[in-house]
Image: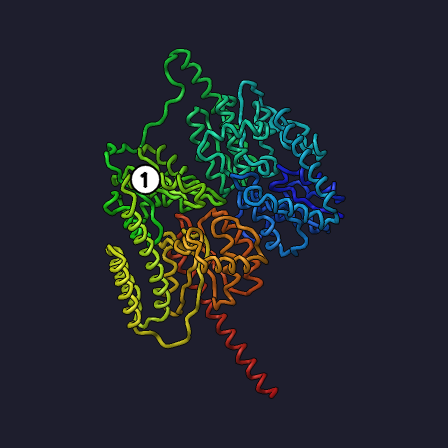
Amino acid sequence: MQVGIPRVLSFFYYLPFYKVFLERLGAAVVLSSPTGPRTLENLTVCPTDEPCISVKLAFPHTLELVEKKVDFLFMPTLVSRDRYSYYCPKHIGAPAMLRNGLALPEDLFLTPQIDWRCNPRASLDSLAAAGRRLGAGERQTRAALRDAWRCQNRFSAATAEQGLTFPEALEKVVGIKSFKRSHPYNRRARFNRSLRVGVAGHSYILYDYIAHNLADRLKEHAVVFVPEMVPPRAAARVLAGTSYGKELWSFEQIIVGSALYWLHQQMIDCLILLSPFECGPEAVIEVFLEEEARKHGVPLLILTVDEQTGEAGLVTRLEAFLDTVTAAGKTVQKVLEKKPDLPAAASPGPRFIPPPVPETRVLGFPTLGKLGGALATIFNGELVKAVGPLPITRLTTELGAALAPEFICYPLTVTVGQMRQCLEAGANTLVMVGGKGRCRLGWYAEMQETLLRRAGYDFEMLVINSPLPLNKNYQPFVKVMRQLFGMRMGRRAAWSALLAFYKAALTEKAEEALYVLRARESRRGEADRTYRLFLAEAKEAASLGSLTAAFRRFKQSCALLPRENGPPPFKVRLIGEIYAVFEDYVNHEIARTLGTLKDVRIEVEREITVINWFRHHILHSPAALRRYRQVTRAARPYLHDMVGGHGLESVGLTALAPREGIDGVVHLWPFTCMPEIIAQSILTRVVRDLEIPLLTVIINEQTGEAGLQTRVESFAHVLRERREEKEVRKRCFSWVSMSEA
């Protein structure tokens, strides 16, 4: 029995385990060919353009194994490797992306789920189930697992103790021969033993064809260190000294831990971070590594590669960087010899001079959608003082983009811009939500603080995490609340929070009514005016009674608005990442655009909201839990696992759309959003199976409103054409039935 393993992603980390486990179960392991020019030519089999190159490569590699007619494809679903961290969402969603993107049968895949954080027992059961599918009994599977772990441990020990790269260790421990060049890459290169270079990056990029043999090229110039050469315990110890290290994504822990180890031990003279284009986690760790490299006075080069990266351009940048590092090192040494008291590297001055910090706490916080009024109820009351909520404008995004990493998701850019505006308006304390998980949101607070302090701002950052589970998170939650409200936190603070919750809930309810009215009103704009009046009254409401009265008046006004007689409006569901779906400025008010088209009436339906999230995750509302189970059941034929954010919900809500009377779906998400990239690849099959129109809108600061308007109008035209075709088919069917009668 032949089992194929694509030479991508976790292959470069866990092949010893995979190979020994399968061979002990009696399978013959077949590997895909190493990436080459022909592989890049076949990248078109990837159904979408947005995944990083490491995921794109998985498609031609997998297709090659399918064409070899292997009996199974082995690609575990990597969720977590310990109690604290997750793998990047692409490792969780890769099997589903490949299965749906290539339209392959589910029973072709062996995808045991590895989840040591939430369900270790289920992980063992999942590996045992893979053994049964290969015809092995429980005893044989256990023995195979033991042998596989031993081989993996020998492999890890060989890289750390003997200073081997992964390809060298694979050849020595597992017998997988690696490419060896018979002549130098650069005949004019001169090896400099005193120059030490650390190369940080994913092994599935560093040792793949797309990196153009970066590590071997560097070895002709300098002593080279790569992440696998650092003992795991040493990397773990240095990560424990950071606020973020323990919960970083698993492979990113290896990258950051090794880089920090080199820096703290003064083992390197320069650092290179090799990153695939659009890599979500590396946009996060880039911020941390830049800060650490700056503190230690070590030059950092960030190299980004994809299928378009040319060898000549990469080599030119690399050699120019090494020349700069060498020249800078000589200059610094001469200066130190003349003036011993002069520091080797002076830190740059702040670009912003903050005002003196006042004694009283003044809060600043980012907003989301219409939540500004609700948050102001808590933070702008008698208990605390706050700046804002400030509206999001073009200036906000420009301020954020000036500090944010290039490939970070758009919400971070916007929130950093909002925080800058708050600080410059007088805030001295920033408030941000936290909570580490699969998505990048959990690292926003650390990144925002690092970026803003680097720009010269002086402030205190308070991070609010969920109080659940109470036995673990209640005390830290109370501590932050006391920092916010002081000893006054009590009945009045609870009352403000309750009023804020009802403001947010009724605002969302009113917005649902607005979407219905827009699609049916006779005089365009009446519904929006009524809604704006309610928002103004809700903002000023100081009690539940006045808030309820305002909502009652809004409903009465809605009932009096004249309606248009005609065919029922089209129903369009908005799905995707919550910030892109919920924040009107970010999505260019796409709900209003859809609802106010001239020739087409469209009713917008939006289920991904903050209050729905709160009901599900915090209040555990029975109705919310039932709906979530319904959505996940609908997604299960296509995606079994949570991939972070709202990726699973995007798939499930699309799968439910036809049976719930939805005519089309709009998928909204920020550029580089990891969970939604996974969902997009899977949705290509969902919409093909269910024949439902899908409009994908990827948003960043460059998104133009005019282009989006044109795309929305084209989408509406598709909806109208489909309805007309259905009516024609219905009339033809009726005519045929009457003729036969």
Q: How far across and how far down the image is residue 332, in percent? A: 43, 18
Label 1: few (<14), some (14–19) or many (≥20) C-alpha neighbours in 10 Å: some
Q: Residue furthest top?
A: 338
692 or 174: which is nearer to us? 174
Q: Amino acid at mark 1?
A: Arg
Left or right: residue 668 versus residue 310 is: left
Q: In this rendering, is residue 254 above or below 100?
A: above
111 or 724: which is nearer to us? 111
Q: Residue at x 53, y 78 (%)?
A: 730
Q: How far across and how far down the image is residue 2, in percent? A: 74, 47
Image quadrant where one finds the C terminus: bottom right
59 or 520: which is nearer to us? 520
- The colour scheme is rainbow
Q: In this rendering, is residue 396 above or below 456?
A: below
Q: Residue furthest bottom?
A: 741
Q: How far across and how far down the image is residue 166, in percent? A: 63, 32
Label 1 secondary element: helix
Left or right: residue 546 versus residue 345 is: left
Q: Residue at x 46, y 19 (%)?
A: 329
Q: In this rendering, is residue 734 above or below 359?
A: below
In which quadrant of the rendered view does residue 539 lie?
Answer: bottom left
**Is residue 86 shown to the viewer in this render?**
yes
**Is residue 408 shown to the viewer in this render?**
no
In which quadrant of the rendered view does residue 228 lie?
Answer: top right
The residue under label 1 is: 482
Q: How many marks?
A: 1
Left or right: residue 379 versus residue 180 is: left
Q: How far across and how far down the image is residue 347, in percent? A: 36, 25
